[in-house]
Amino acid sequence: MTHRERFYKLFAFEPVDRIPLYYFGSWIETKERWVKEGFTGEVIRGDAGPQLPGMDPDWEVGLWNVQGLVATGAIGDVAPGVLEENEKQYLYRNSLGRVDLVRKDGSSIPHTVTWPLEPTWESWEKFKRYLEPTPDRYTPGWEKMAEELNAADRVTTFMGGSFYGWLRDFMGVENLSYIMYDEPELLEEMVSAITDHFMILMEPILKKVKFDFVYFFEDCCGADGPLFSPACYKQFFHPYYKKLIDFYKSHGVPYALIDSDGLMEPLIPCWLESGFDILFPLEVGKWEAAPDKVREKFGDRVRILGGVDKRFMSAPEEELRAHLLTRKAAADAGGYLPIPDHRVPPEVSLKQMMTYIRVFREIFG
């Protein structure tokens, strides 16, 4: 089987020769550790990869920038740079005007001091120009790049939607939470504009490229559940998710994936109604999420990518093996591709990662 054939058959609940072996990238500190421990392959900047011996071609490569074909997202006009700095941390302003306090050791998520978008109509009128789907966003020669993508034997995807996730990054969780109550019409205007942004920019691309699934980035759930209610979901997000997913599927994209960490179960019925097919990453967490438990509740309408507790990757081999064996029945049943439920953390050595690859292949074929 080709990599694409295997992916399609797995999520169509059809027999496959083996389960693909992927993971969801690694921390920068993890990559640095692996290089020190002898890794000599290419290290991609950012979260993806690296590609390790024994793995299938990394599905995340090209995800976040639509495979280099077109620039989606907010493009600002503020001069970026470091505003203040000391031995331990620095203040950095990006091109949107967001100011973050960043630790130099990279050991924590940056703390945002200033958000580029305030929850007001006036602020939105100024900010929304950053999302205008202008023709200059397309990469010169993108049609030729599209031909090469279609010929490649690897699973190809793109980040094709983010309502809560983008707006959270633009204005913060607190402002986004209040706007649902204080300015519901404004929130709907923002979500509508993001929908149009993707539909306009992606239509020419979808006429040329055969993608295997579309990836929606949201991260809208925490340790104790979603950051908004199912009622808010249905009011603000469902109509636009459905519109956008229907658009992608009408242009030949077979599957839509929703990405959120945390306890996502209360939103799963809503996501299914909107047209999502694949849940990712099914973070195990303190609530012990598992693919068989989700399948028992929601049936074969749910497909899953993830569900492997990353904490076992640095555990002794016998514990790792025992954990992976708990995922085998779900994988054999189809519609489930086991991968670690988050970025591989720096406590996982290169040797332990290669052990993970070996044990995975022994269990899943």
Image: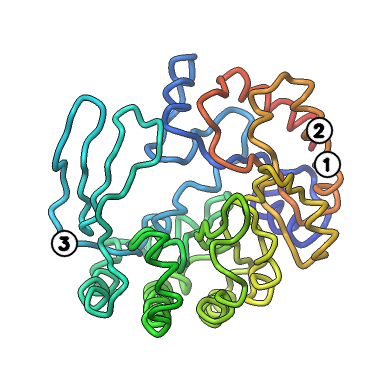
Q: CA distance from mark 3 to mark 1?
A: 50 Å
Which amino acid does the dot numbered 1 rest on?
Answer: Lys
Q: Is 245 located above or below residue 213 in the figure?
A: below
Instruction: Give the left or right position of residue 20, taking residue 201 as reference.
Output: right
Q: CA distance from mark 3 to mark 2?
A: 51 Å
Residue found 30% across the figure and 66% down from its top? 138
Q: Which residue is mark 2?
A: 363
Which amino acid does the dot numbered 2 rest on?
Answer: Ile
Q: Position of residue 259 (x, y in %)?
A: 56, 57
> Helix or strand or loop: what does disc 3 sit on?
loop
Instruction: Give the left or right position of residue 72, taking residue 273 as reference.
Output: left
Q: Is 147 located above or below residue 33 in the figure?
A: below
Q: Is residue 295 visible?
A: yes
Instruction: Report if the CB atoms under discs 2 and 1 are less than 8 Å apart.
Output: yes
> Helix or strand or loop: what does disc 2 sit on?
helix
Q: Is 94 located above or below residue 257 in the figure?
A: above
Which amino acid does the dot numbered 3 rest on?
Answer: Asp
Q: Is residue 134 visible?
A: no
Q: Position of residue 156 (x, y in %)?
A: 54, 55
Q: Position of residue 18 (x, y in %)?
A: 77, 42
Residue found 71% across the figure and 48% down from its top? 337
Q: Nearer the viewer, residue 286 or 253?
A: 286
Residue found 59% across the figure and 27% down from its top? 53
Which of the 4 image quarters holds residue 13? bottom right
Q: CA distance from mark 2 to mark 1?
A: 7 Å
Q: Quadrant of the image for the C terminus?
A: top right
Q: Which residue is mark 1?
A: 328
- Kindly report which numbered mark, 3 or 1, lies closer to the viewer in this rendering: 3
